[in-house]
Image: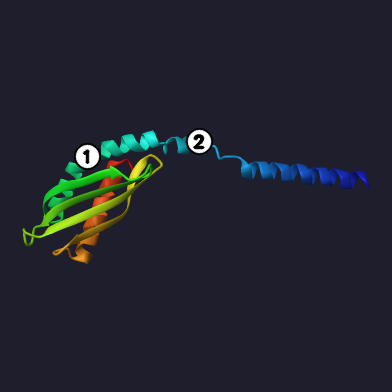
Amino acid sequence: MSMRSILFGFLVLLTGGFWVAATIAEPPDAKQENSKNTPKDAASTFEALKKQLPDIVSAWCESSAILKPKIRIARRTSVEEAKITFEGIAALTEDSECFFTLYLRYYEGAWTVMRWEAGGNEIHPERIKGYMLKLGLTIDKATGR
């Protein structure tokens, strides 16, 4: 074996070792990112959101023709997930109850709406879709996204 092939082999081995170490190493922002996803942070930010919910939901109901909003449930369903359910009365008939459920997820220090459900006799699917998207955006803004 020549000295040249030994040096080449050593260089390949050394380069491969650095490549493996680089792919296994944790990125520098990972510790900072993970620090925002602690259960304690999720709990405290959800409690802060719960305090803002009456104002958020009331403002949303005024702009979407829903009367007498009442928050029924606002709770975490796991460390990183939560559920908010509220009811109201459709302004068109004033006697038809409507129910709305938002499913949230905690990521990178903020709660965000992942999906929603709406039900009631006077709920028009196309109209409520825009209203619910607006509510989701409002909640995202309130939690810092």
The answer to whether residue 15 is left or right of residue 75 is right
Residue nearest the viewer, comparing 110 with 70: 70
User: What residue is shown at x 22% (from left), y 65% (from top)?
Assistant: 125
Q: Residue furthest left?
A: 94
Q: Residue at x 79, y 43 (%)?
A: 11
The structure residue drawn at horizontal position 24% and vertical position 40%, both measured from the top left corner, is 50
Residue most extreme to the right: 1
Q: Position of residue 118 (x, y in %)?
A: 22, 59
Q: Answer yes or no: do the residues labelled 2 and 1 have beta carbons within 8 Å?
A: no
Q: Secondary structure at mark 1?
A: helix
Crowdedness near tag 1: few (<14), some (14–19) or many (≥20) residues, C-alpha within 10 Å = some
Label 2, label 1: how far apart the Cα atoms are: 30 Å
Q: Position of residue 132 (x, y in %)?
A: 24, 56
Colouring mode (rainbow / by chain / secondary structure / one colour):
rainbow
- Residue 8 is left or right of residue 22, and the answer is right
Residue kind at label 1, given as amino acid type = Gln
Q: Position of residue 53 (x, y in %)?
A: 21, 42
Secondary element type, mark 2: helix
Q: Quadrant of residue 52?
A: top left
Query: Does 65 appear above or below 83?
Result: below
Determine the residue positioned at 61% across, 40% down: 25
* Quarter assignment of residue 51: top left
Answer left or right for 46 relative to 27.
left
As rendered, which of 130 and 34 lies closer to the eye?
34
Q: Position of residue 98 (x, y in %)?
A: 15, 57
- Identify the disc placed on residue 133: none
Amino acid at dot 2:
Lys
Query: Label 1, on which residue?
Result: 52
Q: Residues within 10 Å of mark 2 (few under 14, many from 20)?
A: few
Disc with the residue nearer the chain's start (2 vs 1): 2
- What residue sits right under mark 2 in the picture? 31
Q: Quadrant of the C terminus?
A: top left
